[in-house]
Image (tube, rainbow, N blue to C red):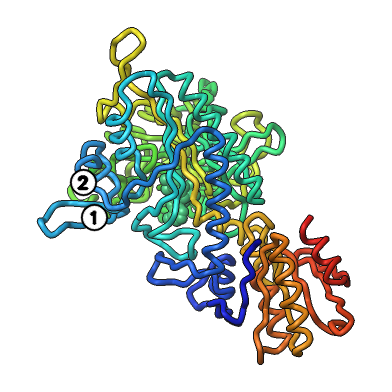
Amino acid sequence: MAQVQRMSRLMVKTLRDDPADAETLSHKLLVRAGYVRRTSAGIWSWLPLGKKVFDNVSRVVREEMDAIGGQEVLLPALLPKEPYEASGRWEEYGDLLFRLKDRKGGDYLLGPTHEEIFTQVVKDQCTSYKDLPVMLYQIQTKYRDEARPRSGVLRGREFQMKDSYSFDTTDEGLAESYALHRAAYQKIFARLGLDHRIVSAVSGAMGGSASEEFLAPAAAGEDTFADCPNCGYAANTEAVTFAVVAADGSAHGAVEELDTPDTPTIETLADHLGVPASATLKNLLVKVDGEIVAVGVPGDREVDLGKLGEHLAPAEVELVTAEDFEGRPELVRGYVGPQGLKLRYIADPRVAPGTAWVTGANKQDTHARNVVAGRDFEVDDYLDVVVVEDGDPCPNCGDRLKLDRAIEIGHIFQLGRKYADTFQLDVLGQNGKPVRVTMGSYGIGVSRAVAALAEQTADDQGLCWPAEVAPADVHVVAAGKALQTELAVEVSEKLGAAGVRVLVDDRQGVSPGVKFTDAELIGVPKILVAGRRSSEGVLELKDRRTGEREEMTVEEAIARLTV
Ligand code: ATP
Ligand code: MG
């Protein structure tokens, strides 16, 4: 027996128009089809149809986590401050963390992710190497005070995550737990019908497996990944790393100062000198934990402040303001150059030793030519800080990279001993001596996966769920007349008895046109219509995706839908 849901009783109110604040397709459709309702910015209620899809996604995740030996637990969302203070994340998370106080004035937070708490649980429960490895997971509500929660359940301030954590005594053990998760994630996303790519997520980890993201290509995605059609290299653009290839700079002439009035921008300078912007060196001044630092990149490239921030974390990166120039006559706005500059100098790998540049001369209205890296200035740190662009060379094979938008649906991470060190998580080893435990942490955005699926599968008519996650297997529509409703209810009950999950539109006083539009919008994979030929006991089965239609009897419909 499977459930037969009657539209006449189901709490679902479909909308003809997109909600005014919706920007993404999934946001529009999940609201219009009555799956979710906005409670507050980034805070969503799951309505009956939405809860079914959410539960189906959770079930698949649970089954595959159980299959690799994961043990399900449920930890609280309301957490004490102390463990997060010990790990440093109470501070590091900054504005992202929801902090609150209890009646006694004690500090608490709403958990954004649970490494600290799982580490404490395992410290308490596992004491010997015989207790490990252990893999724990939960499907639980997380809280992050996201700056721009605009995309519906794609980016909530309250959202549901499957988070798991592995605990091993050896690096090989961790690598194995990681590999198990990686394989389980591939199965999960394949079963859900989510098209996905696995990309390297950590800069410097070229081809490494210390951290990888699962990205679902979609226009609404907030991540950009670079893909090499030639060698298969794929990385989040935040993680694309170029090598510093030193050039032979011996042929360059001496530094030459140029009179360049009114050329404070790269465009005006390139125009004035008749050189391409790529031959100029742009020096951006930022403050890193309050100290002014210069960042040098080719003039035709943009600095990605997010990337810079990630490289320098936990230090805080801010742009300089006019006040920062006060009392610093050596910093000439618009004419800064690295030569002779007494600041920490960070540069893009393209500013490799031996390359020559046109750059500021640290004098008003003056630039300098033939400024050679390694000869006329030193680079303190090479960091990949420019926005990666379509056609940039693949760091692996040199071919042209292709950029695509995607939604991060999962993230797997070999954490190592960071949290074990914080909480002194040791177990007694085989030789009787304590062994420090090594950890992995692995997340899937369960609520986000629902939206990502909607993004990838919807069409002009509405949602269009893959069978595994759809809120029903078949949407039976009674066109309207009493006879048609009778046939629709009869076939629905028989289908239900045969184990098929049915949503039947038995509403009275609703026009057939509205019912058909709603069926398309709601997106159940098969639509079975009791219409014109109901008096002969003939129904029409329509495939929601392909639109193919076929007439059949009740018995034929049951045979077809139970396979
Ligand atoms: P993002 O870069 O999108 O903010 P993240 O890298 O901070 O995500 P993780 O800490 O890796 O996220 O969390 C694990 C998973 O939880 C992510 O891969 C994503 O699927 C999901 N997730 C993270 N933040 C949100 C959110 N605000 N709303 C819904 N799902 C989220
Ligand atoms: Mg992530």
Q: Percent x, y for residue 104?
A: 10, 56
Q: Please determine whether, in this image, residue 97 is positioned above or below residue 553.
A: above
Count the numbered circles shown.
2
Q: Please determine whether, in this image, residue 358 is positioned above or below residue 206.
A: below
Amino acid marked by disc 1: Arg
Between 6 and 279, the one nearer to me in the picture:
6
Between 454 and 401, the one nearer to me in the picture:
454
Say whether residue 390 is visible. Answer: yes
Residue lying farthest to the bottom in this orientation = 509
Q: Sequence-wise, which precedes: disc 1 or disc 2? A: 2
Q: CA distance from mark 1 to mark 2?
A: 9 Å
Residue lying farthest to the left in this orientation = 104
Q: Percent x, y for residue 31?
A: 53, 72
* Secondary structure state at the residue bearing disc 1: strand
Q: Percent x, y for residue 505?
A: 67, 79
Pointer 1: residues within 10 angstroms few (<14), some, or many (20+)? some
Pointer 2: residues within 10 angstroms few (<14), some, or many (20+)? some
Q: Residue at x 44, y 68 (%)?
A: 45
Q: Which numbered circle lies on residue 99?
A: 1
- Pointer 2: what residue? 81
Q: Quadrant of the N terminus?
A: bottom right
- Ligand 1 within 8 Å of disc 2? The answer is no
Do the numbered discs 1 and 2 sit on residues whose CB atoms are within 8 Å? yes
Q: Please determine whether, in this image, residue 507 is positioned above or below residue 33.
A: below
Residue lying farthest to the top in this orientation = 431
